[in-house]
Amino acid sequence: MFEETWARSALEPRDPAIGYAPDGGIVTLYPLDIAAGIPHGLIVGETAARQHAVRNIALALASCYSPWDLTFAFAGLGEHPLGEPLDLPHIVFSDDELLRRPQRLRGFIDYVADELESRASAEPDSAPGVVVFADVSLEFRSGQREVVKALLSLAERGKALGVHLLVSTSTVEDTTTWNRLLPLLGWRVVASRLPSAELQRVLEMGALSFRDEHSAYLRAGNRSPRQFTLAPDPPRPAVHDFVQRTQRRWKTLRRQAASRTLDAGSFDVIVEELPDIVPDTELTQDDRHAATDAGKATAALREILTKQAEDVRQGRSRAHRHLIFPAPYVLEMRTVARLYGKVLAERRLLTRGDLVTMAYARFSLEDDPRSAFDHLKRLYSRSRGSVVLFHDPPGQDPGNSGLRPEMVRRLIRLMDEEHDDALIILSGEPARFHELRRTVPEFAERFRWVTALEPGTPPGTIEDPAVAEILRRLRNAEMHARPPDERRPRHIVYAGTDMLRIARLAVEYGRMLAELGVLSRGDVREATADWLGYIADEPDKTMADLFRESRGGVLLLHMTRKAIAPVGTTTEAIFLEQLRSLVREHGENPVVIVCVDDGQMLGFRRFEPHFADLYRRLSEFPLIVGDTSPEEPAESPPELPELPELVYARELPAVTSRRIPIGIQHRPREPAYVHFDADPHLLVAGPPRSGRANALQLLIDGIRARPAGAATDVYVFDAHGILRSLAEEHGHAAFQVPEVGYTDSVEEFREVVDWFVREPPETEVFLFVIDRDLEDDPLRVFPRHLLTSFDNRVHLVLAKLLTVPDQRLDPMVSALHEAGAPALLLGSQYGQEHRLYEAEPPSGPGLVGRGVLVRGGRRHVVQVADRFG
């Protein structure tokens, strides 16, 4: 019984039976057992015979594995691989006649690419295995280049990612394409008679006899071909009964899994993870990244998941409710739909969770209602386990839309007929959904209204764009739900000079926190204190008085170097000690903004070991195109020439101070520097071939070239030897630099870190950590407080590949950002690091060394110099 085999572990061996040996014994296709290690195969024969073989295999696997463990994708360039499709619950993709329908063909190619990429970036074994059945019907033609590329990619990458490829065809000819593909197909079935030359090519044995039309041969790995007879097709009613039983069993298993998975606490955890999930950009339909309102998307997801948790608490433990986005389509809706589908799929509440977008107009009833309903049914069947977002294209007249009561009634009927296994999201004007609630009784019960996406009154505009930009970042931080021990601090230390702007920010920040219910009033109390904690113009006030009077609002506190206290006055504690004590006593009520200069900032960070846990650092207001300071008249910036595509290190200024020149920045057009005295740590991130190794080598050279001062030690952990490879690429036999400790050994590097953790170093120490593995982390013993202690004697330069959207960000990257570390983000691709640092990649083609340097709230497009030029 399939119910018993479904209950077994996915890695427990099975014996998918497909036929009979001449002695009457059962022949099993053991290579397709998940544990067998020979994932890819080939079936060759005339149409009826090979479809018979594919049906035997599909039914055998469906009886051996549940959809939790194995799924199927069917793609026919001509006919369907099965001949007549089956409605098994394992199926995640099924289509045929792809060569005649370019859009459908593109859908299959996109499915293959998405499946491989999502599995490559996910945790191992987090997704069920998948068998891709591809019937190529005839010989590959030149017009099928993309298909060939997709199949080769599946065969080459699939084994490590849990993907099996089964190619079925009528013939295998001696061509370049087959010569590339055939060695990757480790088992082969010949389902009908073939010419001896073709038998030799497929089975490496040309003299094979076929007793009758049911004879076939199986060859797996290096074994000799084995003759067998394909099991006869079961009667059609028996197949139908089996499919129906698998559907019912699958629905039961999903309901049971949902009841186990749907606990309120699990959704609390998901909500806490939203800041690490929701990006600031989304892919448009033409595959461009466009900026989105992450706060709006986060609020919508929070509402959806919170209401789902309430359902659980009330005993309504269903996997999901279909959704209404009551507004015209915006890109944030795609973000919400895509991420909600991903959350549900990770928790086995949807089988796939991928996103399908569809225009209502494709289901218009004006011309042919029956055709529209048939089209809707086909879409629903193909989208099983997916998220389907319906919308009107921009500018679409709602009167011509397919969002009509008749269409929604049909959709609800399909939910009942097709096992309710897709998540449907409807978007559009609120009035249309009010009408549907009135005219379709089941609508309100099936679909949940998402209030966070309703059209709202835009917040009041702030005239100063630089203040507005900082306030936007602060609002986004508030909107991202986090547990208390991970939430970004609300206190701010400002090390800039624009006092008019910081005062304006304090007013707007207080107003925003009051609107969000964080502060009771949000008004601002401003004062100036000296290093002893005396208050200017208020001799009878103490720091403690200021905190008490400012509760419910914002305390804007200026720290001055000028002595305010009478000469000879002593106090029990200096300003920083008093501030630390009062912040711990009062928490974030009031919210404190402390204004200091650069030197005071360094002292502040050295004095407060938990600086990054208590304060956000604001070095300066961002420079925004068209922006002017409140006290300066508007002036058009001069036109600057574009950055050169290549800069040589010899063209940069010599290292004559503690600053290290690394390239040229655009605005203003001058050398770009890294200054470890001002900013002790640095993040370097970028995709492959973006110039990371070259930039790191420049930094190491610059550190060694700095004028004599404190002794300096440089240690490099290079997991994949990218510095060594760079050196060898330019004719150097090995990476050998005097006074630099270079290793790719995790244990050796951990010993170095452990050494200065136990004994604070007397020298200045630079740690370059390149492409570390978080599972075997060389920084495992590195305490986070070292990022703000030891008088900045320990410098961390963390280099890594760019984190693509939707992947979890490295916690050390977040820690560096919170500690105020600058970032050199190379390449033209957008990653999670860009989202965190709120920086856009440079536009134009991705040049080696081109990137953006983010430091102190300012972003400069830079061209890093070629060290070896």
Image: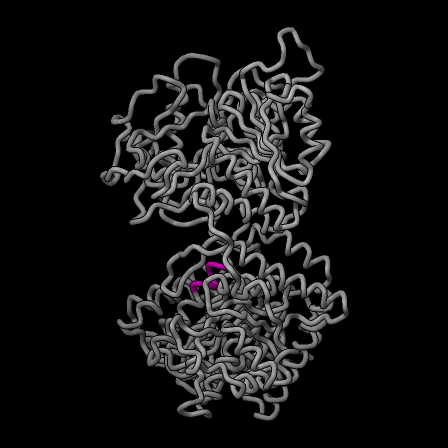
Q: Is residue 250 visible?
A: yes
**Image height of 432 relative to 725, above or below:** below
Q: Which percent across, then down, holds residue 476?
A: 54, 49
Q: Position of residue 597 (x, y in %)?
A: 50, 24
389 or 562: nearer the viewer: 562
Residue 225 visible within the image: no
Q: Residue at x 55, y 83 (%)?
A: 408
Observer-nearest of 160 and 244:
244
Residue at 35% from the left image edge and 69% from the top image edge: 147
Q: Which quadrant: the N terminus?
A: bottom right
Q: Is residue 580 left or right of residue 141?
A: right
Which span is picked out in magenta? 113-118
Dominant SS in magenta: helix
In the picture, measured across the screen, residue 202 lies left or right of residue 470, that is left
- The C terminus lies in which quarter of the figure? top left
Q: Nearer the viewer, residue 757 or 537?
A: 537
Image-based side of 698 in relation to 116, left or right = left
Residue at coordinates 59% horizontally, 59% vertically from top-left? 126
Residues 847 and 203: in front is 847
Q: How many marks?
A: 0
Q: Is 174 part of what is drawn in magenta?
A: no
Name the spot of residue 515 as percent of width and height, x first. Answer: 61, 50
- The percent coordinates of residue 478 (x first, y second) are 59, 48
Name the quadrant containing residue 525. top right
Vertical relation: 576 (above or below) 799: above
Question: In the figure, is residue 298 to the left or right of 179?
Answer: right
Colouring chosen for the image of the structure: one colour
